[in-house]
Image (cartoon, rainbow, N blue to C red):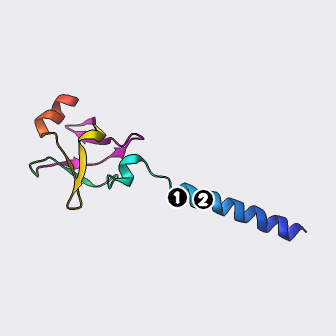
Amino acid sequence: MKKSWFLVSMVAFASIAVAQEGIATQGESAGVAPGKMLLAANGARLGAVYRVTDDGSAQLIVDGKLVTIPAATLSVVDGKVTTSLSKSDIRKLR
């Protein structure tokens, strides 16, 4: 009886762990993930994504400050994370 209770509890914990692994933020499911390089629409490198917020916005560090790039401006083009904002637009977000 004890062994079957132990087995049931192990299966329950394993299923919770598997379910949590499948949870991703909106941005991460769209290909935006920490560490990926963020590019401007013209192809200029803006920096590596530091964090992805719950709403899918990307955060990166620009000139020593944390800047949030709205999710609505992000897309994945040829496997590369791209924003419709220019570098000067991003500097204004700070």
Quadrant assignment for the N terminus = bottom right
Task: Count the marks.
Answer: 2
Q: Mark number for residue 17?
A: 2
The residue positioned 23% from the left and 41% from the top of the image is 73
The residue positioned 50% from the left and 58% from the top of the image is 22
Q: Which residues are magenta?
A: 44-69
Would you place residue 4 above or below residue 65 in this image?
A: below
Q: Amino acid at mark 2?
A: Ala
Would you place residue 79 above or below residue 63 in this image?
A: below
Q: Amino acid at mark 1?
A: Glu
Measured as percent of width and height from the top left, residue 37 is found at 23, 54
Which SS class for mark 1? helix
Q: Using a 10 Å C-alpha cutoff, classify the residue at mark 1 as few (fewer than 14 neighbours), some (14 to 19) or many (20 or more).
A: few
Measured as percent of width and height from the top left, residue 28 is found at 37, 52
* Residue position marked by numbered label 1 in the rendering: 21
Quadrant assignment for the C terminus = top left
Residue 66 drawn in magenta? yes
* Left or right placement of residue 48 versus residue 22 in this view: left
* Left or right placement of residue 33 versus residue 21 in this view: left
Give yes or no for contact between labels 1 and 2 (Cβ–Cβ under 8 Å).
Answer: yes
Q: Main secondary structure of the magenta part?
A: strand
User: Which of these two is toward me, 17 or 63?
Assistant: 17
